Image (cartoon, rainbow, N blue to C red):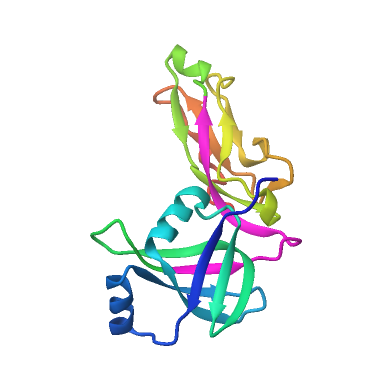
């Protein structure tokens, strides 16, 4: 297993719009750390360091948050749980970090990446994609950034449902209804594959 990336964070006493505006002007991003037990700690992190980290970990890779809160130092395995952006800028406005228990499963939504060319499309079929993300269950150490879906074997009239997806080791799809992910339909054909597409 590769070594986890780290992000340094400082405790934050002042909150509110004006205080946060001053932080951002000095190159810092307001944040909150939520511990597994429910406690929350207001923090600040370097905007530049956060940008670099987020480019690598996104929201599904665990990293170590090194917190210095009034001289009390701790290191917490975390995920980026939520991130707010400025409406007109590609810049973080606020970030929430969620402390994880490495021995407990998490439920997260991850994107699907479709690979290959469905053979049915060569016969005039059209791909109908119903889901581009799914919920998965996994311990933090095995969380994937995305799920690869090989569609090269799909012929006209064939498709894949969530139960058909190949999951990485230690990962399973979370669903109540075996909903459709993708089908190859002939133009004008009945698109019955969408049945159950709202299950999660």
Vertical order, 167 against 56 (above or below): above
Left or right of 138? Residue 16 is: left
Left or right of 173? Residue 182 is: left
Q: Can you give x and y, in whole percent of width and height, for residue 158 in the image?
A: 57, 25
- Using the image as rendered, state which of residue 27 and residue 132 is in the foreground: 27
Q: Can you give x and y, in whole percent of width and height, for residue 105 in the image?
A: 71, 59
Left or right of 160? Residue 121 is: left
Vertical order, 175 against 149 (above or below): below
Q: Is residue 100 magenta?
A: yes
**Residue at left offset 69%, top offset 52%:** 141
User: Overall secondary structure of the magenta stretch?
Assistant: strand
Number of numbered labels in the structure image: 0
Q: Can you give x and y, in whole percent of width and height, for residue 74 in the image?
A: 63, 74
Q: Which residues are magenta?
A: 95-115
Residue 95, picture quadrant? bottom left
Q: Is residue 80 magenta?
A: no
Q: Can you give x and y, in whole percent of width and height, for residue 55 in the image?
A: 45, 49
- Using the image as rendered, state which of residue 198 and residue 104 is in the foreground: 104
Q: Quadrant of the N terminus?
A: top right
Residue 72, picture quadrant? bottom right
Residue 103, picture quadrant? bottom right
**Residue at left offset 48%, top offset 69%:** 96
- Using the image as rendered, state which of residue 39 and residue 71 is in the foreground: 71
**Residue at left offset 63%, top offset 58%:** 107
Vertical order, 102 against 22 (above or below): above
**Residue at left offset 30%, top offset 82%:** 17
Residue at the top extreme of this rendering: 123
């Amino acid at each position: 297993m590769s070594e986890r990336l780290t992000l340094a964070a400082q405790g934050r006493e002042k909150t509110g719009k004006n205080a946060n505006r001053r932080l951002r002007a000095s190159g810092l991003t307001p944040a909150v750390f939520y511990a597994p037990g429910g406690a929350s700690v207001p923090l600040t992190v370097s905007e530049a360091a956060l940008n670099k980290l987020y480019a690598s970990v996104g929201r599904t890779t665990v990293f170590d948050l090194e917190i210095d809160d009034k001289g009390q130092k701790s290191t917490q395995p975390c995920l980026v749980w939520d991130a707010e952006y400025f409406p007109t800028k590609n810049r973080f406005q606020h970030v929430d970090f969620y402390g994880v228990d490495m021995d407990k499963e998490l439920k997260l939504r991850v994107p699907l990446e479709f690979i290959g060319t469905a053979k049915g499309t060569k016969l005039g079929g059209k791909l109908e994609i119903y889901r581009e993300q799914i919920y998965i269950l996994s311990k933090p150490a095995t969380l994937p950034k995305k799920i690869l879906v090989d569609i090269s074997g799909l012929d006209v009239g064939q498709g894949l449902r969530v139960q058909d997806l190949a999951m990485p080791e230690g990962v399973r799809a979370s669903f109540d209804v075996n909903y459709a992910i993708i089908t190859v339909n002939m133009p004008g054909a009945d698109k019955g594959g969408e049945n159950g597409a709202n299950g999660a």
